Image (cartoon, helix red, strand yellow):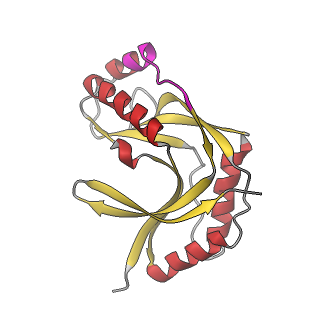
Amino acid sequence: MENTIRSFTAIELPVELKQNIKLYINDLKAAAPKIKWVKAENLHLTLKFIGNQPAAITDKVIANLISNQAITRPFQLSISEIGAFPNKKKPRVIWLGIKADPPESLYSTFKWIEDKLEEIGIERERRRFSPHLTLGRVKFPGDFTAIWDYVQNNPFEPYNFKVNEFVLIRSFLKPGGAEYQVIQKYSLHK
C-alpha cells in the first residue's frame, strides 16, 4: 500500500492570538460543557483541505505552490465576532469570524491555491469559501442559550494581525486529537 499524507493549506495564527482564544474558550466551557472544544495550539485558518494523497502527489503540491508564490501582497486579518454553523439555535460548529483587509486578499489567496492544485488533479472545494476559526464542535443537541448570553455580555476582544505567508500542514490523526506538522512555508509577495 502506498504511503499517504493527509494535508491542508492554512494561515498560522500568532501565539498571542492563540493564547487569547484559549482563555476565552476556558470561559466558554463553563457555559457549554458538552461542546468539544479545539485545543488552542491547533488553531489555524484552513485555506484548502487537501486530504489523504499519495506521497508523490504531496511532492507535486509542494512544487506547484512554490512555482509562483506571487499570489498577493501581505494583508491584514481581523478576528472578532463569534457565530455558529448552521445557526445559533442548532449549532454544529462554534467559530470566530475573520475579515481581511483588503477584503479580496484572503479569497484571492484561496482561489490561487485552488487553481494551482487543480492543475495537478486535486478537486476544487464544493462548498463556498467561508473563512473562520473553529472553536468547538457540537456533538449533541441541547439548549445553547447560556453560551450566546455569555458571548453577548463578554464579546471576544477583536485581534488584528498581518499575514505574510501561508503553510502546507501535515495532519496526523491520533486518539487524543489531530497533531500538525508544517511541511512547507510560502511567502506572500508581489
| Residue 126 drawn at (x, y percent) | 57, 57
Side of 57 relative to 99 (left or right): left
Is residue 11 found inside the magenta-colored segment of the image? no
Q: Residue furthest right?
A: 190
Side of 35 relative to 52 (left or right): left
- Give the quadrant of the C terminus: bottom right
Answer above or below: position of 10 versus 130: below
Q: Nearer the viewer, residue 120 or 103?
A: 103
| Residue 185 drawn at (x, y percent) | 56, 63
Q: Residue furthest bottom?
A: 1
- Give the quadrant of the N terminus: bottom left
Q: Residue furthest front?
A: 16
Residue 123 location, quadrant: bottom right
* Residue occupying image coordinates x 61% and y 39%: 77
Answer above or below: position of 144 versus 97: above
Q: Nearer the viewer, residue 123 or 114?
A: 114
Whether residue 73 is visible, yes or no, is yes
Q: Nearer the viewer, residue 142 or 32?
A: 32
Is residue 154 found inside the magenta-colored segment of the image? yes
| Residue 162 drawn at (x, y percent) | 62, 42
| Residue 87 drawn at (x, y percent) | 46, 31
* Residue occupying image coordinates x 42% and y 20%: 151
Q: Which residues are magenta?
A: 150-159
Q: Nearer the viewer, residue 66 or 104?
A: 66
